[in-house]
Amino acid sequence: MAKAGTPEQRDSVVCPFCGLFCDDLSVAISRDRIEVLGKGCALAKELYAAIEPPLPPRVDGRETSLEAACARSAEILAASHFPLVAGLGCDLVGAKAAVSLAESIGAVIDHAASDAMFKNLLPLQDKGWMATTFAEIKNRADLVILAGTDVVSRFPRFFERFVWNTDSLFGPKHPPDIVYLGGGFDTRAGHSPDGKAPTVINCDTLRLAELFQALRAVYRGRTLQAAEVAGASIASLEVLAQKIKGAKYGALVWAVADLEGPHGDLAVQAMCDLVTEINETSRFSCVPLGGSENALGVQQVCTWQEGFPLRTSFAGGVATYDPYLNSWRRLLDSGEADAVLWVSAFKGGSLPFETKVPTIVLGAPGTAFAREPEVFIPVGTPGVDHAGHVIRSDAVTSLPLHQLRPTELPRAADVLRAIDVRAVARKEAL
Amino acid sequence: MLIKLAGARVIDPGNGVNGEIRDIFIRDGRIVTNPGTKPDRIHDLMGKIVMAGAIDMHSHVAGGKVNIARALLPEEHRRVQRPRKNGRRAGTGDSTATTFMTGYRYAEMGYTAALEPAMVPVNARQTHIEMSDVPIIDKGTYVLLGNDDYMLRAIAGNKPQAAINDYVAWILHSTQSLAIKIVNAGGIAAFKFNGRSLDLDEPGPYYGVTPRKILQTVARAVHELGVPHPVHVHGCNLGVPGNYETTLKTISGIEGLPIHLTHIQFHSYGTEGDRKFSSAAAQIAEAINRTKNVSIDVGQIMFCQTVTASGDTMAQYRNRVFAKPKKWVCMDIECEAGCGLVPFKYRDQNFVNALQWAIGLELFLLVDDPWRIFLTTDHPNGAPFIFYPHLIRLLMDKTFRNEMLGRVNKDAAALSSLGSLTREYSLYDIAILTRAGPAKILGLADRGHLGPGAGADITVYTEQEDKERMFSRPDYVFKDGEMVVRDGEIIAETWGGTHVVRPEFDRASIERDLSGYFDRYLGMRMEHFRFSEAELADQNRFRSIVQPCRKSDRS
């Protein structure tokens, strides 16, 4: 652990700042800053550097004790008729405590990134999919299609760690063919180390559902009347269909947060349908990359504890799942929620909403507010201020986060549990 | 505190006790001999039946694939709801019950342990974090090997058995597991090379290793390490008509090494009759009866909506056409495993389903030695575990069984020998199948029996003619000496432990090799793959119960 004035080097550090959770960073830790020495991407460098010093809790803008802040939080939640527990940027133990709290006070639970996450979840719940994970791509993939994303804006080291490796388990690896579907991407990361340029099929990324249905028809050998679909020429889809047929192990990658527009779930559905069909004769897999800030971990905790992946209400003591009605943003915008507890432990910055209803924020010290919330409890960052666990964005591998510096900041999980106990006691007293 | 359970009829096959009236004394969570001092509490159990807490030795209760199945089926979770009550957590689902629901329901049925039988190694950390949300019962995991690149490469490269043993031990330690599971040896790996079937003696793609060789090598490693539970095997060709021949060859091919064949019902199919689907239960049972190194669990199916959750992507991709509702998931995982989820509805008027049901029961009734056969539905693959009381009645009550047989598909019933089987299980037999037997085969020395020194996991029943009712709702359940269920209701929430084994091995030697392997090929540091109990020390409810290994057989 770092002492004042003497930077300490730590290797094999797990970076908590995107869904890849790269576990090979070297960092220099001193009392007031953490500097990336090796393997960190620009995002990691920026976010480690942006870590702010600890702050005391505030109630109505006045500094106070953690105990008083928890008590005030419990009071607000116990008095609420329709509380919302959301944000949920936290580690697994934090998510457990948040789901438990939501159940005790009859709240709705949801994650900050759920608009994006449900573009994957709805197609999963409608039809399912065939998916794969990073080590399989690293060792097997000979074709990687990126649909509507450059991947690296959200997951900076994706190519470096899982695509451009030169040796694989199954012999020397030829760089896989890379195909971008969309326009305006920075495709530099998709150039192979030996200089091979990726294929870019320009198209309207808001119309990927159409594009993939057309691609599936072309893959089946159907003749299409149209000359282009969603801005892509049928000829370019025919070339892509041939590449797919020639691939031994293909990967179709999308970053769900990049599937903009209202119908991203239909694009995902069309991609899953194509992959399922390809598997009748050869191997191909979806890589439905989920969110950062442990979004997949939080979704999994909610699923194992309650049977539903977020957007669940506990009003009346039963779990009621509604992927539309229980969106945190809708509940705040419509004025239905009358209190909100928001958790965002991984990074500071502005809250993604403004509301007049009583607001409790468990956030990184650098959190900024347009309106001072009723309660602000600065909490430690998992992987910096305390140890924890997260689930990688390919949904299977879980990683341990380490504590890098001593801190007086509490863990979100402990604060949530303290509020839970007090809120239950208050509700019983009411 | 000293607790006395007074005057019950004790059925404890672990100690050869069959229905004698006895007192049981509990101190500090353990069963003790009568200390001769005045008990602090006495439960008068006159007229009651007392058994050890039941152990489900094969139940998919947690981990990545189970959680995908939960997410896949919101309709089931909407249908089956357990409200939050008296501070007990809410829960949903049958076949994909949530963690709290799982613990409560097992305890309410008198079960005090359930073992997750197919944990993907890289998913160990998540699985244990998830299982630490399963209240009351003890847990444990069997970790998957036999489709992982490292093992197949080691076998293909003729690595010495000692090095393979070190790897197996390292995996058990690093994933906090109790046993080794093999699912479709080599078949999941073959599917990643676009293989669609792989028979026992067929060299798999790339590695050129046969499933038989994989089974032999891993079975030997488990045996030589002194791990109590034999290698736990989900065989080749699951669900394929005619697969009984593969199963028979698997039994003979293991050459006397201990082996456990799981959900054998799904591997006991013949090809006779007009529909080319028939029961081969008699042939399989005959082989089991003859081959003492083999144990089995049944994987009984029941007529219901459920979901099949398996590591066997090759079989699950094949079975996708039967999905009901029509949705399914298959995943390739990290060059070590896979998973497949296919929802399934078993219907009594469907010929195949009815025959599957009969085949499971035939196996129960034709295998002679109750110490080598275990009561499972392969939850949730054959049915959710909540069907156990019904299954027990089918085994104990011939009249009821035949009545049920009369209701299933007539063609299937006509082809089955079930109606001619007159055997009825006794309470003593059931106690072996669900308590003493599983504890013995898993090496849980202090569980599954009621002798001094045992953990005080105890279930108290009122004997009833209707055995389904009797086993559905025990009067009392004690977990580690604490009463957790009274009259079928949870009255206390405790947290069980996690059974693990930690065989001796040469860590330095295997880690020298593995460290570079992880860095180069898996894109994850070896030290982050290893999951340690200390990681959960300050936040979760993980407590290991280290079960002893036999003295190593290695010279």
Image (tube, grey):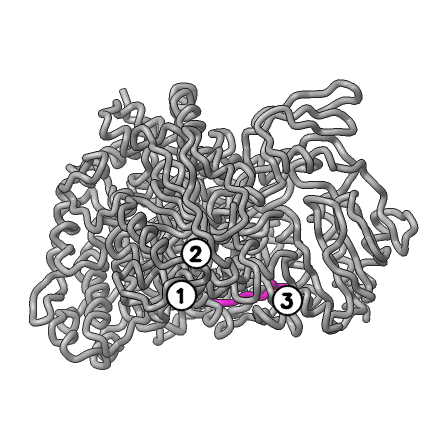
Residue density around tag 2, few if under 14, some if 14–19, many if 20 or more, within 10 Å: many
Magenta-colored segment: predominant secondary structure: loop
Question: Residue at image x 86%, y 55%?
Answer: A372
Q: Which residue is mark 2?
A: B66
Task: Give the label, 1 or 2, closer to the camera.
Answer: 1
Look at the image and give the residue range highlighted in magenta. Answer: B85-93
- Residue B178 is drawn in which quadrant? top left
Q: Amino acid at mark 2?
A: Val
Kindly report the distance in space between the C-alpha atoms of the residues bearing marks 1 and 2. 17 Å
Residue density around tag 1, few if under 14, some if 14–19, many if 20 or more, within 10 Å: some
* Farthest residue, direction right: A62
Kindly report the distance in space between the C-alpha atoms of the residues bearing marks 3 and 2. 25 Å
Label disc, if present, on residue A327 of the rendered structure: 3
Residues indicated by labels 1 and 2 sit on the same polypeptide chain: no
Residue B435 visible: no
Q: Amino acid at mark 1?
A: Lys
Q: Position of residue B468 (x, y in %)?
A: 37, 72
